[in-house]
Image (cartoon, rainbow, N blue to C red):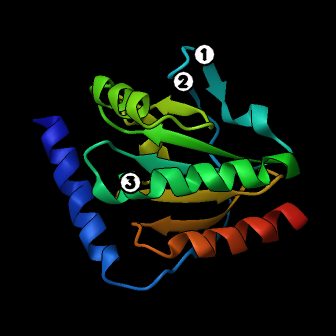
Amino acid sequence: MKVYLNQIMLLLGLLAFSAGTFAAKEMNAPAPDFTLKSLSGKNLRLSELAGQVVLLNFWASWCAPCREEMPLLNDLHNKYAALGFTVLGVNVEEQTDKAVSYIADRPVDFPILLDNSNSVSSQYKVIAMPTTVLIDRNGTMRYLHQGYKAGDEKEYVKLVKRLVRE
């Protein structure tokens, strides 16, 4: 029941944000640190990436916009990795087998983390799927974007370029 309610809340949040234009909300708050297990089995701690620009992408396998966005985020990750940029995909499903299956069929080059207790998505107040948070080299959350529609990745590129130049 909890999974179903979480999905309904996230879907409602997505619907609320999908009708508008791209609007990355500017932020200036410390990014909450966390440790999550990755699909590779290793734990990853956000603070280990200090000095890099990080794009956190909260997603679920049942989310169509998330599935559409995933290969575009992979391209972004690969294009800017040499400049100190990384993408972290944070899967929010309680049952991790669907995330494992999805990524097995559509591999990405960035770490996929498992937030099956929704502890990290709660820390980041995720209310829509997907939710993307850009964190600067100092560990400060700078931009928040909820939802995804074709073309949003162009704005991600602008924001990532801005942050890697700082």
Q: Are marks 1 and 2 in contact (CB under 8 Å)?
A: yes
From the viewer's perspective, is 67 left or right of 8? Answer: right
Specify the label residue 38 is tagged with. 2
Residue 119 spot, x, y in % from top left: 43, 35
Front residue of 7/124: it is 7
From the viewer's perspective, is 26 left or right of 106? Answer: right
Q: Mark 1 — residue?
A: 42
Residue lying at the far bottom of the rendered structure: 21
Looking at the rendered structure, the kind of residue marked 2 is Ser
Residue 143 spot, x, y in % from top left: 62, 67
Residue at 54% over, 24% down: 38
Q: Earlier in the sequence, mark 2 or mark 3?
A: 2
Residue 166 in view (yes/no): no
Residue at 86% over, 45% down: 51
Front residue of 119/10: it is 10
Q: Earlier in the sequence, mark 1 or mark 3?
A: 1
Q: Mark 3 — residue?
A: 66
Front residue of 153/126: it is 153
Q: Secondary structure at mark 2?
A: strand
Looking at the rendered structure, the kind of residue marked 1 is Lys
Residue lying at the far top of the rendered structure: 41
Front residue of 45/84: it is 84
Residue at 16% over, 54% down: 8
Residue 32 in view (yes/no): yes
On-image quarter of the N terminus: top left
From the viewer's perspective, is 46 left or right of 104? Answer: right
Residue 161 spot, x, y in % from top left: 79, 68
Residue 117 spot, x, y in % from top left: 36, 29
Rounded to the nearest angstrom, the CA distance separating label 1 from label 2 is: 5 Å
Rounded to the nearest angstrom, the CA distance separating label 1 from label 3 is: 23 Å
